[in-house]
Image (cartoon, grey):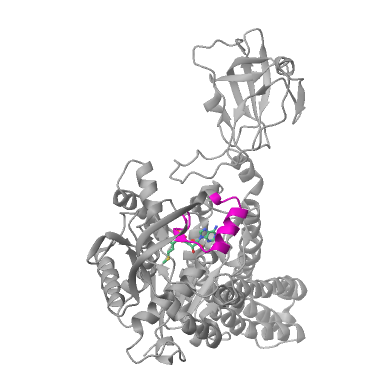
Amino acid sequence: MSQRFYITTPIYYVNDKPHIGHTYTTVLADVIARHRRMLGQDVYFLTGTDEHGQKIEKTAAARGMTPKALADEVMPNFQNLWQRMEITHDYFVRTTDAAHKAVIQERFRQLAATSDIYKATYKGLYSVSDEAYVTETQAKEMQAQGLAHQLVELEEESYFFRLSSYENWLIQLYEQYPEFVQPDFRLNEVKQFVSPGGELGHLQDLSISRTSISWGIPVPGDDRHVVYVWFDALLNYLSACREGFWPPTVQLVGKDILRFHAIYWPAFLMAMFREAGDDLAGPLPVRIREQLPHTILAHGWWLMGDDKMSKSKGNVVRPEELLRFGNDAVRFFFMREMQVGLDRSFSFEGFMDRLNADLANGLGNLASRTLSMLQRYRAGVVPTAAVLDALDQEVLEAGRTVVPAYLAKAEANDFQGALDLLWTYLRHLDGYIVKAEPWKLAKDPGSQDRLDTVLCQLYRALRATAILVAPVMPGLAQQLWAGLGLAGQVADQRFQTFQYEAPAPAPVQEPSPLFQRIDKESIMQEDAIPAPAAPAVVDEAPLDLPPVKDLIEYDTFALMDLRVGQVLTAERVPKSKKLIKMTVDMGLETRTILGGIGTAYAPEELVNRKVVVVANLAPRPLMGTMSHGMLLAASDNNSKPYLVSPPEDAKPGFVVR
Ligand code: MSP
């Protein structure tokens, strides 16, 4: 029987559409799932949406709709995106599914019957953004980060999960089974949390019901309470598991939700799987360990600059913006750039550079050169390598080792390392072509054997690349596979039976470009025009208001001449994302004014608009144009500028005083 492999992604909140952070997690899971299938394993891949809880309730209320209607509206954004990105999940779970609800209630009852769940009164500080009670240390941290407004003092009757009883077993889990959390430095973080001297100190029992929220699964037999969203959400992995696949092999999470997955989740499972005779103060039974997830794999964040990409910060990149360059390109970029576990800054320019370097040049170039040489010199028929000189021998050795080395990295879920290694090999082959000079060999009747060798080696390298990268770039790999004259689907190949040196079964085809080079310059120009802002389905970001400046006398204020103006024309300043050049009717005259409002307004939105202008500001040059005056706009330290508008019936030239 083939090995079972159960892989999960977190289930995504439905209060917003997916951004590239969510997309990354799902793509990584898909790459692992596809890779495992090509190892012949029997894979079950689960993803879905997390549809209960306060965040959804609040977002829905703000939009004047029911939470279920919101979930129904947002959920398809995930499903459609996953389809577009060729994600091969076997099941998509929603926490509002009846089957899921039934499991939550059944497990709640089970744990209440064993006293792992009990009812009491809880008083403490609650973080609204995390939907969790926080410890004193965490509360202090949040205050220090200026997040005090997210903390509220709550006192409520609650059901508790006896987390404290599982501390002993949890510590043994981390000590004896370090593969439980990967990468290892993330395991250390978890150990830190639960060690008695650590951030959480001894584990406290966990409140797992709410009376303050109504959008959730009712506690069986006490429907004033709904089940806490994390008890509800984490159990999706159980409720939506397919028969025969338990326990999970790899569970992907972002580092922000590692705590829930590495502490609460195994503790819930320990409580569910323990038997009457098990001693919670004794050794962790192997039988229990075997029912727990094998590995929680925690990845880092995509950042914008130094900030986490998140909708509340308004700095998210949507996958649609990248998918114009193709699904394979986006998947490759994620895997090639992000070392699992660490954070990485996203830049659009870096994205294009990577694709041009590795796909248009790199692999694309090597493939088209190889196929055209095979066509030109050998009518498409792949020769065998018969005579090898030292250079050929070196390339052959490198080729023989690259496949197992790649597979070993991939097995450890290190696709960044695996791809790095493979692309180093591809670069090596570019050097091989330069040194071997096949175009000269072609002209020399005495060098035909060597030419055979060079062509054969290039072919082998491309064939190995096609199979190795098939989980990462399914479309591109298939195109390369077919171009090499290989039949069937590359995804149906098995890594174990792949032979690097096997003879070519059929002639190769004419080359067709694998990846169209991106014209970065023109894209950057075009990119200076921001897409219309997506309708905001967002929680309000906390305001970041600067303190009021020092006092000034009235006379100082009176020096300023503020006037009503009306924008006559507006256009973007070339090569600038921010600046818009406007002509403004000021009543007495028409002025040219440059405003840094291009990320917030499109030029056509500005024409005819009435604005307030600082009329007596000394003119100054901006990007080669004199700007005579300044428009007033309102914002906090983070938000976009909102133009200050005078009343509609105010005339151009009116004095604002
Ligand atoms: N609903 C919970 C998960 C419950 S799992 C039982 C949740 N949802 S989420 O939609 O907010 O986030 C889902 C995943 O996306 C998390 O793993 C999170 O780390 C990941 N990402 C969100 N923003 C991210 C980045 N900027 N970068 C990378 N991943 C990030 O949490």
**381 over 218 or under it: above or below:** below
Report which quarter residue 227 is drawn in: bottom left
Along the viewing direction, whichever of 45 and 126 lies nearer the viewer: 126
Residue sitting at 24 percent across and 63 percent down? 222
User: In which quadrant of the rendered image does the C terminus lie?
Assistant: top right
Left or right of residue 211: residue 509: right
Query: Hey, which residue is sitting farthest top in the picture?
Result: 588
Residue 342 at x, y = what percent?
A: 62, 67
Looking at the picture, tell me which residue is in the foreground, 581 or 519: 581
Q: Using the rendered image of the protein, determine whether residue 83 is visible from the camera's viewpoint.
A: yes
Residue 158 pos. (x, y %): 35, 63
Residue 37 visible? The answer is no
Most foreground residue, 313 or 447: 313
Instruction: List x then y, in percent, for residue 31.
Output: 49, 71
Position of residue 633 relative to residue 271, above or below, is: above
Residue at horizontal 50%, vertical 51%? Answer: 150
Q: In the image as oriented, which residue stretches furthest toward the left? A: 221
Instruction: Please tell me whether residue 145 belongs to the stretch shown in magenta.
Output: yes
Q: Nearer the viewer, residue 242 or 201?
A: 201
Q: Which residues are magenta?
A: 126-148
Task: Give the image quarter of residue 511.
Answer: bottom right
**44 left or right of 612?**
left
Which residue is painted at 46% across and 61% down in the image? 133
The number of discs equals 0
Quarter containing the N terminus: bottom left
Q: Is 342 rendered above or below residue 276? A: above
Q: Who's the residue at 58% across and 65% down the image?
A: 300
Tell me residue 499's x, y (percent).
54, 86
* Quarter of the view holding residue 366: bottom right
